[in-house]
Image (tube, grey):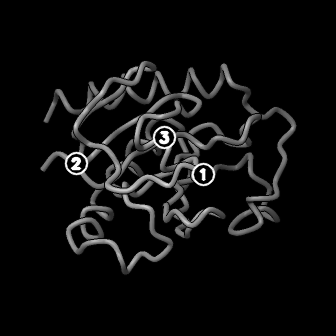
Amino acid sequence: MRPVVSLRSGIRKKVSLLATETNHSCDYCRWVAGLDRPVGGILLETSDWVVIHHQKIPCPIPGWIHVVSRHHTPVFGQLSETSRSGLFRLLESLTQTLTQLTRADAVDWVMFPSAGGHWNAQLIPVNRSVPPDFRGPALFSWQPDMPSGILGVEGFCDHFRSFQAESLSRI
């Protein structure tokens, strides 16, 4: 089963996979609905999820991605059974892709609602460059010496989409 519905280039096209409800003050809702473009664009879309790169610029870790629900809800249990079960297949697939692309030692999964109340999962490739004191929850406060700027994030996202398209063509 292919979890990917569409790969996106940097330009957002109108599609039928819009959020069922849009909270216009929520960045995630605005990106899912195509009202704004996240840095790096949309990486992947499924019927229930949208994948984007971490938006903090400079980015501490290229490849830090967010898997965002199409539904604005702060509670995982309020998502449909199909959406919840499909998430774990998608996270496993994305973990494999990130491990290959970033040569990470591990990919940490963190799941919670955003400050604006939109549930999301974050996949964070971790390797030896991350000091041991900043593994786990402390990673959110880590500031590396050479963070990735907008061009680095855009470049990673282009590479990710190319890699995914090549991977899917072999399935």
Placement of 73 over or under 166, stated as above or below? below
Nearest the viewer among 62 and 115 is 115
Left or right placement of residue 24 versus residue 32 in this view: right
Residue under pointer 1: 25
List x then y, in percent, for residue 94: 38, 48
Q: Nearer the viewer, mark 1 or mark 2?
A: 1
Which structural element holds mark 2?
loop
Mark 3 burial class by Cα count in 10 Å: few <14, some 14-19, many 20+:
many
Mark 1 burial class by Cα count in 10 Å: few <14, some 14-19, many 20+:
few
Placement of 84 over or under 38, stated as above or below? below
Please state which amino acid type lies under the numbered disc 3: Trp
- Rendered residue at 30%/27% (across/down): 14
Which structural element holds mark 3?
helix
Q: Nearer the viewer, mark 3 or mark 2?
A: 3
List x then y, in percent, for residue 101: 47, 35
Left or right placement of residue 147 versus residue 48 in this view: right
Mark 2 burial class by Cα count in 10 Å: few <14, some 14-19, many 20+:
some
- Circle 3/circle 2 CB separation < 8 Å: no
Placement of 14 over or under 142, stated as above or below? above
Nearest the viewer among 142 and 83 is 83
The numbered mark, 1 or 2, whose residue comes first in the sequence reads 2
Which structural element holds mark 1?
loop
Q: Please tell me the numbered disc located at residue 3.
A: 2
Please state which amino acid type lies under the numbered disc 2: Pro
- Rendered residue at 28%/26% (across/down): 165
The numbered mark, 1 or 3, whose residue comes first in the sequence reads 1
Q: Please tell me the numbered disc located at residue 31.
A: 3
- Rendered residue at 31%/44% (across/down): 18
List x then y, in percent, for residue 62: 62, 37
Left or right placement of residue 44 versus residue 142 in this view: left
